[in-house]
Image (cartoon, rainbow, N blue to C red):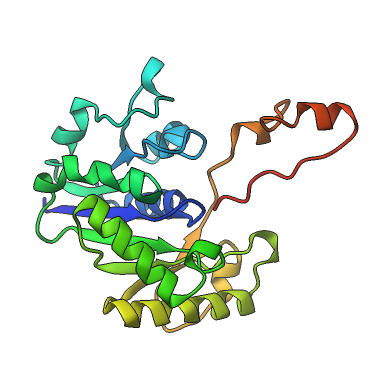
Amino acid sequence: MRRRVEVFIGPFGSGKTEVALNRGLLLAAEGSAVTLVDLDIVDPFFRARQVREVLARAGISVVAPEGEWEGADLPLLIPQVFGSLQRPGHIILDVGGEVQGAIILRQVRTLLPEDAEIFLVVNPFRPIMGTPLRIGEMCQALEDAGDVRVTALVSVPHLGEETTADVVRQGHAVVCAAAALLGVPVRWVAVREPLAETIALGIEVLPLRLYMRPPWDEPGRTAPGTEKATLLGGGSRGQDRH
C-alpha cells in the first residue's frame, strides 16, 4: 500500500484542524487506511485529539499524547509520531498554528516523502490573511519556520453563521489571487454543510462538518474570565473557530 502524506498548516482561525479532520474522515469513508497525527503543540482548546473517539469509530488511527500529557503544550513529540510517518496508507499531519506551531515540522522534516503535500489553509476573512499579499507573507513565514514549501492552498471562506454562497465566492476569489501570486494551485474550497451542496466554483468542494468546540461551549461550562459577567446576567460570545 502506497504511503501518502498530507500536512495541514495555517494561522489561528484558519480552519486548519477542521479541514484536516474532515479530510481524514472522507478518506476513511472511501476505504483508505488513515493515520491522523496531531502535531498541534500551541492551541490547548482546538486540537484533533479532542475528537479521538469520533475518529476511532471511523477507523482512523490517532497519534497524539494521551493521559496526563494530552493537554500539554510543550514543544516535544511523542515517540509514536516518528513511527507513524512510516505507515502505509494516508497520513495526515495537523500542525499547530502560527510560526511557533510550524517549527515542529523541522523535527520530522527528514521523514516526509518527497511527494508530501503541504497545504496552507486560508480563511481570507481573518485580518491576518485578508489580502493576497498578507496570505503570501503568512505562507513565507510558515514555510521558513517549518523548513517546508507549500504545494497548494485550501480555501476556507468562512464568516460563521453569516456565511452565504456570495461570501464564499468573494472570499474564494481572494484565495485564488493569493495562489496566483504564490504560483501554487488551490486544492479545495472547504465549505460547511449543507451550504457546500450549493457551491459551484469549478473546483472540488470539501464539505465541512464542524467538530471543534471550546471547553466553555460544553454544557455547564463558561469561557475563561467570563464567570463574573455570567453571574451579573451578562453573556459571552464563544470564539468563532472554524
Above or below residue 100? Residue 126 is below
194 and 111: which is toward the camera: 111
Above or below residue 44? Residue 200 is below
Above or below residue 57? Residue 141 is below
The residue drawn where x is 46% and y is 38% is 43
Compared across the picture, whether 222 is left or right of 102 comes to right
* Residue 208, x across and y down, in percent: 51, 58
> Which image quarter: residue 238?
top right
Compared across the picture, whether 13 is left or right of 139 comes to right
> Which image quarter: residue 115?
bottom left
Above or below residue 131? Residue 34 is above
Residue 211 visible here: yes
Residue 95 visible here: no
The residue drawn where x is 22% and y is 61% is 117
The residue drawn where x is 49% and y is 40% is 46
Tag count: 0
* Residue 124, x across and y down, in percent: 51, 69
183 and 202: which is toward the camera: 183
> Which image quarter: residue 170?
bottom right
* Residue 241, x across and y down, in percent: 57, 50
* Residue 130, x across and y down, in percent: 52, 70
The residue drawn where x is 48% and y is 75% is 131
